Amino acid sequence: MGAIYPDLAGKVVIVTGGAGGIGEAITRSFIAQKAKVGFLDIDVVRGERLAAELGADARFVKCDLTDIPALKAAIQTVRDAFGPIDVLINNAAHDERHATLEVTEDYWDGRMAVNLKHQFFAAQAVLPDMQATGKGAIVNMGSTSWVIGQGGMPAYTASKSAVIGLTRSLARDFGEFGVRVNAIAPGWIMTERQLELWVTPETEKSIYENQCLKRRLVPDDIARVAVFMSSDEAGAITNQHYIVDGGWN
């Protein structure tokens, strides 16, 4: 259990990609804050299982985030269940590796849709709620992949670098309404998926050579920052890109 922020109790939170990995850790962390959490995900099995475990203050909504009308409908489902949205965590993404010379136009557009486009339209859907209350927090999930110049995934790194531009634009436009918009850039977080697909003993050795901290970074490391950024304790923080990578950068 991390720090408790009393102002988050009763707040209505949306977490995209909230059924697994970093998103699951964020969903659990907001429930621990006694918030009401609507989490969107395409994985029905994991989503329904997590909602059953977390109880009445958690609402799972199946959603393909690349389908913008479905995304807007999912957000409305959460609003109907819990009330106006106070916090949005744009977490969902897909870091599929791909070779530059094999990328097609359709593949590129698909990567932008899953990693960037939905962040804008989710924010657009909740901003009127925040304007009406004169307060709100949006946290967009970026990545350090583009910062370190990682290869083998150009569409992903391009989309994640664009998260910073989106964050800064929204922070400027909506700050006058009391809405704060920040980005978190995780380093190499040891989710179940990462451990299954990408992490080998050689890879992990290389990670520790680059990190100042010689330990695994885990989803809760990101969730703690997301919760803090959404709380009144971060009330003067907006327009920022916060790196959580164990000191790699």
Image: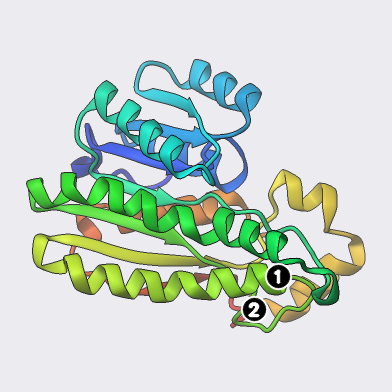
Which amino acid is tagged 2? Cys
Task: Left or right? Give the position of 217 relative to 171.
Answer: right
Look at mark 1 in the image and give the residue it sits on: 214
Secondary element at tag 1:
loop
Cβ atoms under marks 2 and 1 closer than 8 Å: no
Say which residue appears at 49% left-offset and 74% top-offset. Answer: 162
Quick one: label 1, few (<14), some, or many (20+) residues within 10 Å?
Answer: some
Residue 128, image x, y percentages = 17, 48
Of residue 89 and residue 103, the one placed in the foreground of this image is 103
Say which residue appears at 83% left-offset and 47% top-offset. Answer: 196
The answer to which quarter of the image holds residue 17 is top right
The answer to which quarter of the image holds residue 192 is top right
Task: Left or right? Give the position of 149 relative to 4.
Answer: right
Residue 216, image x, y percentages = 69, 59
Figure quadrant of the N terminus: top left
- Above-or-below relation of 65 to 174: above
Can residue 227 be seen?
A: no
Which amino acid is tagged 1? Lys
Of residue 178 and residue 67, the one placed in the foreground of this image is 67
> What label does residue 212 carry, if any?
2
Can residue 209 be seen?
A: yes
Figure quadrant of the C terminus: bottom right
